[in-house]
Image (cartoon, grey):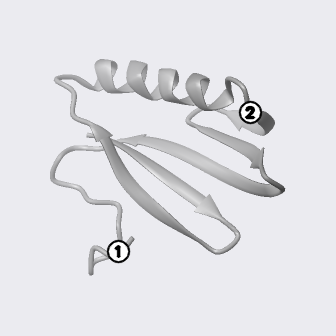
Amino acid sequence: MLWEEYTTSTGHSWSIIGATLSSNDCTSIANRAVADRKRGNDVMESEGNHVMIMLEGNAILFRYLCLPNTIDPRDPRGAQ
């Protein structure tokens, strides 16, 4: 499963981007997601699986993780 973490100064949330058949497919999609976030945005920082952009005066960090479908990165309550 490809997960996206969205972090701002007020908190963070997780969303599922999609499921893939292999870890290589997931990594490729994660790399495309990072490239898509960079396109047309004011990029403050980018390395590996994350990109930080400035949007309307706020820094937003996007992080992409490929995890087995048995692992949920959200807290135990499932809160986002």
Residue at the spot x=35%, y=67% of the render? Answer: 74
| Quarter location, residue 71 | bottom left
Q: Which mark is residue 15?
A: none
Residue designated by label 1: 75
Q: Element at badge 2?
A: loop
Q: State which quadrant residue 26 falls in.
A: top left
**C-alpha separation, residue under disc 1 versus residue under disc 2:** 30 Å
The amino acid on which the numbered mark 1 sits, given as a three-letter code, is: Asp
Query: Dot 2 corresponds to which residue?
Result: 41
Amino acid type indicated by mark 2 = Asn
30 lies left or right of 40: left
The quarter holding residue 38 reads top right
| Front in this rendered view, residue 73 or 15 | 15
Query: x, y percentage for residue 76?
Result: 27, 77
Residue lying at 26% horizontally and 40% vertically, measured from the top left: 1
Q: Is residue 3 above or below residue 27?
A: below
In the rendered image, residue 45, in percent from the top left (x then y), is placed at 78, 39
